[in-house]
Amino acid sequence: MHKTFKCVLIKPSHYDDDGYVIQWYRSGIPSNSLASVYGLLSDCAELKVLGPDVDIDIDAYDECNTIIDIKGAIRKIRAAGMGFVGLVGVQSNQFPRALDIARQFRAADIPVVIGGFPPSGCISMLPELPPDLKAIVENACMACNDRGEAWCQKVNAEAMDDLIKNHGVHAQPLPDAVVEALRAANDKLLAAAVAKDPVTKKVHDSYMAYLATYKQWAKYSEAPYYEKILGKA
Ligand code: B12
């Protein structure tokens, strides 16, 4: 079946001192960045980089001279079934506006990529991310963590139910000896990764310190919940 990957590229404008989006009837100069990213994606479309049965369809808007129809763009991406929004060539003064645009697409669960000076320039030039970018990374990590856990629990539970009811699968917890062997293999693998790479060691040590505190709490909270409350339900 033929599919379409919808790309919506937006070059954000910026706010004036009263919080209005600055827009002109016509732009004096078209944006280099928007034209370049459009060109790269057109090339991808021509080369069929997503496969012979996937068309890449691109809309490009410069907010400096266009009122962006965000709801319309969301509808188009949803109608295609897949796609993303690219906020293009975002300079520092346009960053707050870019985030406000991004938030509206993210609320509709549409992937957003930001390119330009604040994200790319800060990552390549500064020793560490400024607070606003750190907040974005933290937000994204929290969203992935929450969604990942909730999604896995729901989907795994449904999948196991299906396996047992419809596919004759008999479910049993792993035997203790297998769990112990897996733990030993896991410890060995982690020790090797930690010995090889200082960043892995940093993440590992930080996680293990957290885990030690978590275990203390879980002994009184999670363990009784699973063993005494959920187990009896
Ligand atoms: C040319 C230029 C201009 C031209 C733009 C002409 C035009 N037709 O677009 C003019 C003179 C108009 C201009 C104006 C301004 N500029 Co100017 N400009 C530049 C310059 C020299 C090159 C930008 C460029 O065209 N690069 C070529 C394009 C193709 O590359 P790119 O933008 O990096 O995009 C590529 C990648 O980053 C990536 N990418 C970008 N977006 C996205 C998005 C996605 C989703 C993805 C996947 C990839 C991606 O793909 C692109 C293709 O490879 C840069 C400095 C520099 N060397 O980058 C300063 C620079 C961007 N400008 C700057 C400034 C401050 C301004 C002004 C605000 C100046 C002013 N006070 O008025 C205005 C703002 C204009 C506006 N409305 O945006 C600063 C921005 C600093 C900051 N902290 O944000 C820079 C970095 C210069 C500097 N070092 O101070 N500028």
Image (cartoon, rainbow, N blue to C red):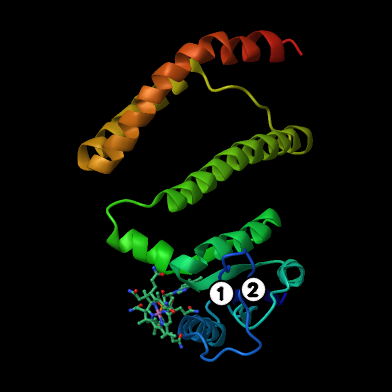
Which of label 2 and label 1 is nearer to you? 2
Residue 68, numbered circle: none
| Residue 148 in which image quadrant | top right
Q: In this rendering, would 29 be left or right of 163?
A: left
**SS type, badge 2:** strand
Query: Where is the N terminus found, in terms of image quarters?
Result: bottom right
> Residue 80 appears at what percent x and percent y?
73, 71
- 86 left or right of 230 in image: left
Please state the quadrant of the image where ligand 1 appears: bottom left
Question: Is label 2 in contact with label 1 (beta carbons under 8 Å)?
Answer: yes
Which of 110 and 48 lies nearest the eye of the viewer? Answer: 110
The answer to whether residue 34 of the structure is visible from this angle is yes
Location of mark 2 (residue): 5
Image spot of residue 112 (x, y percent): 58, 63
Q: Quadrant of the C terminus?
A: top right
- Residue located 46% across and 12% down the image: 216
